[in-house]
Image: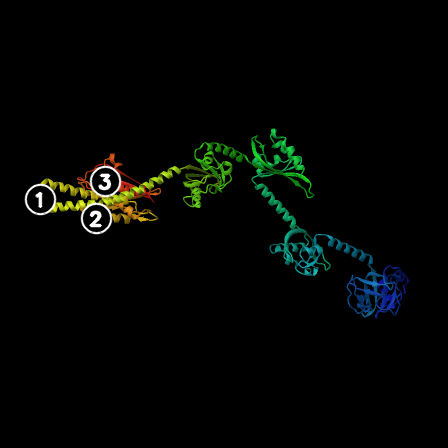
Amino acid sequence: MMSGGAKALTAFVAGGDLKDSVFRELVEALPVAIYTTDADGRLTYFNAAAVKLSGRVPELGTDKWCVTWKIFLPDGTLLPHDQCPMAIALRGAEVPTGIECIAERPDGSRFWFTPCPAVVRNAEGRIIGGINLLMEITDRKHAEIEANEQFRAIVETTPECVKIIAPDGTLLFMNSPGLAMVGASAGDALIGRNVYDIIALEDRNRFREFNERICKGEKGSLQFDIVGLKGARRHMETHAAPLRHLDGTTVHLAVSHDITERKRGESAAFLLGAIVDSSDDAIISKSLDGVITTWNKSAERLFGYTAEEAIGQTVAALLIPDDRQEEEPDILAKLRKGERVDHFETVRRRKNGSLIDISLTISPVKDHQGRIIGASKVARDITERKKSEKRLVEQAQLLDLSSDAILVRDGHDRILDWNRAAERLYGFTREEALGKISHELLRTEFPEPLSAIRETLLRDGHWSGELIHACRAASRINTLSRWVVERDKKGDVIRILESNNDITERVRVQEEVRRANKDLEQFAFSATHDLQEPLRSVKIYSELLATRHGDTVDEEARKFITFVRNGATRMELLIRDLLTYTQATKFDPGSETADANEALNGALSNLGGAISESAARISADSLPSLPVHGMHLQQVFQNLIGNAIKYRSPDRQPFVHVAVERQDGYWLFAVSDNGIGIDPEYKENIFGLFKRLHTSDEYSGTGIGLAICQRIIDRYHGRIWVESEPGHGSIFRFKLPA
Ligand code: ADP
């Protein structure tokens, strides 16, 4: 059943004219442009509003499809008349509702409209005509365009990055500041691409989740890093909201700003704060009225006030002792003039009332415009330095009392102090010496490389040795030098104390004695050598006298000949031993190392006859190698073991043992026997030349054996001594450097 209105409309369209005057009046009066066409699209009716809107009076029966003159799509393309919405509808096709078009009037003016074409069919369903309503939307469109333009202007002028992202990450829009931030020269480089590609790898997943959340309708903000098209990394902060897109989907609208600089500033400020807090110096800032504004950890340590207690107080009230109050106005006046106060040494008061020596460096602090707004103040505790300065003065006074030349050096050998005795000894005044490198000033000759001396000094804390120094007068002096190193709590060298005792005279005398000894040795050698010749004559002729004339002389003469022969033999022994004595140290020890086992074996083989004759038993520890000449060691063993056998007890089989043990830097040897022993009264004596406790009748010998041992061992700065109990054997001990 068709309603009355519909019937009227059908009739209206089909008839091309309006019979029903009420209806006609109604349509005429409507402010909406309406027109009708026949099935071919030829105009059959239009109302006054259509004329007004289109700016022309159409020709009925001739004009087709449109009352309008020219139609354009919103993007500006001209639409041919047979493609206009009414034409499409009459062809039976669906025309989407709500499409927007632009029409141009013959006078060139344009207007926006939305067409609402509808077809009218007869009872069989055939299209018999059409009716179209043109709703003008120019005002709305203009408002929309204006709003759009405003939005674009805002978006393009904001320094932030404005962007729209699709749920899958496709970048739909980005303003030019945003494109600049990511290093894109034009939108084409990025728009339409997936935005995830420029998110830093470590933030990409977080960003994807964030985008998906926003596209589901949430709001939110996020910080992330981007790596721009040119590789630059930037730190971004974004605030995002969902946006309904034209196609009905929800997309992600975001305003992001570059917080790289802010982050850098934050981390720089953080670092600076950490540096200030970790400083050993008290770092304080104050306003130009002297009110404390910041207070670091060391300030707390140094002055005893916490930051809460100190900030807001004036420096004058909190720290400055009463008798120094005048300092602060002077300091503040300087700061106001933009001047700095450098290493100002003064005294300040702690919370507990005690005073400390400090060194202050205060600099004016300026704002961005260069105006002085306050001051930064670095206070260093110099109590220790003051104390050590005082100590140094006292020390210097003490040093001056010493008769040794004393110089104090720093870790780089620069002379820090130089006492009176040093002035006297070397001829350089204190002023001349201070600051000089000690071994350069004194042209020191060291007994070993300076680096090796330093090594010993640092390891043991002290060193001593003989040095040769040059005085101002260019003469050379020998000194016995003792060095002691002083370190701080951390173990760093503070200074080295060097005390030099002049031993030039002693060295000269020693040298003279050495030379005299050498001459004496030379004399003894040639004397003993030369003595052998006449001795040989005495021996030969006394032998000849005994063999050839023994029978012809009387008893008394024979006895005298025997005395001469015995005397000559003994003299021969004496000369031999004396020669050995003078030669005892002839081997240069050099850098030789002797295996004591070998030296012992050599001695035992030389003593072979005496050993087998006395049936002596000899044993020994395993012996070490040591830096002596092998022949020297062999001689010592031979003399000691020879004596042990010679001075054996008649009641028992002789037993000799050679033992050794390590002691400090020495090897301590012991040759013990079970012989007759030695009266303690003589235990020093027996090491002298020709010193014997027995006559030649009792025991053969010359009294030179132990003197030789002593001489050899002295040569190595060792020592030999005896421990004995008469009747119970003896222990001869000697030590040699290891
Ligand atoms: P010599 O053996 O030629 O007399 P030495 O210098 O070797 O000379 O010894 C000096 C003296 O020391 C000896 O005369 C002896 O009285 C005593 N003496 C040395 N060694 C021993 C020993 N092992 N036991 C007892 N007395 C000794």
Horizontal arrangement in the rendering, residue 610 relative to residue 324 (left or right): left
Kind of element beneath mark 2:
helix
Q: Nearer the viewer, residue 717 or 578?
A: 578
Image depth: mark 3 or mark 2 in front? 3
Question: Which quarter of the frame holds ligand 1?
Answer: top left
Residue holding disc 3: 703
Does residue 473 appear anywhere in the picture? yes
Kind of element beneath mark 1:
loop
Distance from Cα at disc 3 to Cα at disc 2: 22 Å
Q: Is ligand 1 less than 8 Å from the beta carbon at label 3? A: yes
| N-terminal label among 1 and 3 | 1
Kind of element beneath mark 3:
loop
Residue holding disc 1: 552
Q: Amino acid at mark 1?
A: Thr
Q: Amino acid at mark 2?
A: Gly
Residue found at the very far top of the displayed protein: 323
Q: Nearer the viewer, residue 642 or 18?
A: 642
| N-terminal label among 2 and 1 | 1
Q: Nearer the viewer, residue 646 or 320?
A: 646
Q: Residues within 10 Å of mark 1 (few under 14, many from 20)?
A: few
Does residue 175 appear anywhere in the picture? no
Image depth: mark 1 or mark 3 in front? 1
Q: Locate the C terminus by quadrant.
A: top left
Query: Which numbered circle lies on residue 509?
Result: none
